Amino acid sequence: MKIKNLILSASLAFTMCSVTVADQAPVLDVMVPSGKTGSTMAQSVLINDALIELGYDSKLVHTGNCVNAVNYMNNNTERPTIFLYSDNRYYGDKKKFNCNIVAKDDNFVVNFNLKLSTMCVRADTDFTTFEDFIKNKDRVTIATTNTLPGSPYTDLSKQFGVDFVRVDFDGTKKTTAALVASDTDMMYQRYTGYVANHPEVKCFTTSASKAINGMPPMTEVFPEWSLNQLGSIQTVMASNLTREQLENAKNVIIQIQSENDKLRKYLADSYMVTAGEMDADGFGLAGFLENVQSIIDLDAQGNK
Amino acid sequence: MLDFWFVASGTIFGYLAGLIPGVGNVIMMLLMWPLLSDATLLQMLLFYLGLISACQFSGSVVATVFGVPGESSSMPAVIEGNRMFHRGVGNFAISNAALGSVVGSAVSVFTVFLLLPIAVEFIKDFYNNNIQLIILLVASMSIIFLLGTSWLINMLVFGLGLVLGMIGFNHVPFGLFMQNFLPYETFESMKGGLPFFPVIASLYVFPVLLNTMQQSSEFNSQSKYIDNVNFKKHLSEFKNNIASSIRGSAFGSVIGLIPHVGTSVSSNLSYAIEKNLGLKQKTYNNNGDIKSLVAAETANNSTGFTSLMPLMLLGIPITASEAILLSYIEANSLTIDYRYTVESGMFITLALYFVFVNLLCFMVSWPAVSYINYIKKVKMNIILFITGIAIVTLVLYNGYLNYNIEFYFGVMVALAPVGYLLRKAEPMVLMIAFILQDRIVESSTAFWQIHFS
């Protein structure tokens, strides 16, 4: 009887301890309102892992698109949740689905990264100038991420007298796979670690203002292209976070970016401007909305 | 160790699935979502291998004893096995089918290992959007023309599956499907697309259960299963049929590689060939022919593994249960293709477990056959009713998890009348179209843009 009681008490104590420990762990879920094969998903997984390592009670919630994300946020009124949201998607979701996640002071955490855009070809493609590459071609197909609005290559077609054709794929991996499989001649994509380190892909220019990694800027290669300086900002937004929690979440994100080896490598490999750098420069919500406006303007200017 | 439990639970649930005619591994896969919702890719595949293998074993037992086909691949067991059962040698029908299944699984693993390096090299060198679209079209056409009784009805059902899959948000082309025609503003949740579970519950499970209810009234409860023969005698009988088993294995392994042809065609074709051979050699027994039965059952199991190849190498499902497996894999944010299965080394583990599962099924399920007589006492309609309730609960549970219980319920109820109409058609056609829709649309769009835009 004594042993039985002892076991019972020990179990009870263990359960109480577990509950107490669980209660103490701060909650911060990571939602993914986009596809499963893109860089948003990859980064969200890294953030989720890092939060768990830091002692957070953190779940990864995949909602897949803006509509499901809004529904999730409307109904999940308890667990604090953060999510990565790019400027392209911010605009595209509103335009295509009338689905509006509005970035405001009370749900904006921090800008997560500023990605460069890049143009790439297969690694075995040999050319010295872009004119060389398009010589004898009357049509150039470009694997393009599906969220980019409009027809972005109209200017290029005019400049080079060659038909540049947009071919849509969902996410970085599918876009890259299309290029590698020779479905398309080129790829226009965000310059991420995956693209930068892919052995079968050769990127030859970026949207940076100066040469990076031996690649000249797009302003030199495509001087008349209106998108030649267009980068992409990915921001961190939140649901169910108080002002104080927003501030804490910002600090944790900056900490994760600077301390987590995988994330640090991911950002460094692709020459991204980090959350810490943007925050230190005062590049916050207004900066993000400005970039969204530039996408709206480009779309309105006839890049349709 | 956890991996082993996934194999073991897949085997147990597969065995149970085979015992309920018509329900089979597809509905069991649907019911297993709570178990698989956090599983890794390896665990899901192990569970699935256990499930499909065990389901074949118990399915042929039910077909032999009761004369009711669990799935269309069990027809030879219904014809030959049930005739043998009625002339008092049902024990040999079951033992030889089980032994044949083990041989079939070993041959298919060997075949796959032989072809795998070539297949991977081919994919690496030649697999592009054009090839993917061709495979998807061949797969779609074969399902339309080979399943059921009318290709015209299949085509309409396939089209319906595609349209249902396209409703709401689409990644490529990025936008809402038929924005001006569908009531997205009234039903805001529809923008996110029709959820998988309510659609499958109404348009697959419901018609299948209706059909099975009709079939279960044909259960024969007169004869009893008796086996007083020792193992040696069973083995010696199988020795007489080993040539049929090898022919069935080879045939099943090859057929398994053809999209959507699957176990049903391999089993029935093997059966037809072996029966023809028997008729020519005048060895065919009109009161239940064991050689034809062994060939069919062996082909069945060898197809089980080889038919997984398109899914494991390219991420393209070719059976209804594989389609559900793929949707689970994707729901868990995982990817399946040769990089994750072959190049990661996972494939060897899967092959070894597949042979192990078949041996386990053979060792466990054969002695368990003696309890088959108890099944006769169970009212099949009650089991089917409970299965239906479990599926509805699962739909509502998923709705609850997604904070959208009313929408899930609404979709299920709204589609139920269509499901009722589909009871005379082949509901698997709709399910595969619904699940493959995004690939078909994405690949077709890219094809159009690359070549014509």
Image (spheres, coloured by chain):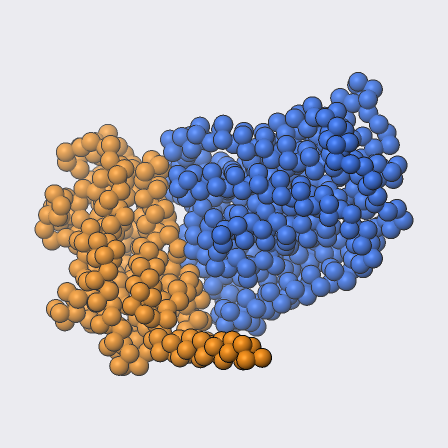
Chain colours: A orange, B blue
Which residue: 61% across, 59% down? B31
- Residue B254: give x, y in percent of width and height: 58, 29
Is residue B277 placed above or below B43 in the rendered structure?
Answer: above
Which residue: 32% across, 44% down? A176
Q: Residue furthest top?
A: B281
Is residue A190 placed above or below B258 in the rendered structure?
Answer: below
- Residue A254: give x, y in percent of width and height: 21, 67
- Residue B83: give x, y in percent of width and height: 85, 37
Q: Residue furthest left?
A: A210
Is residue B330 in view from this perspective? no
The quadrant in which residue A31 appears is bottom left
Is residue A179 in view from this perspective? yes
Along the viewing direction, whichever of A151 and A186 lies nearer the viewer: A186
Along the viewing direction, whichever of B364 and A179 lies nearer the viewer: B364
Quadrant (top left, top right, bottom left, bottom right) of the C terminus of chain B: top left
Q: Is residue A72 left or right of residue A289?
A: right
Along the viewing direction, whichever of A261 and B432 lies nearer the viewer: A261
Q: Residue furthest front?
A: A2
- Residue A14: give x, y in percent of width and height: 45, 76
Is residue B191 placed above or below B285 in the rendered structure?
Answer: below
Is residue A244 placed above or below B173 in the rendered structure?
Answer: below
Q: Is residue B70 left or right of residue A169?
A: right
Which residue: 67% across, 42% down? B363
Q: How many marks?
A: 0
Q: Is residue A242 left or right of residue B365?
A: left
Which residue: 33% across, 35% down? A182
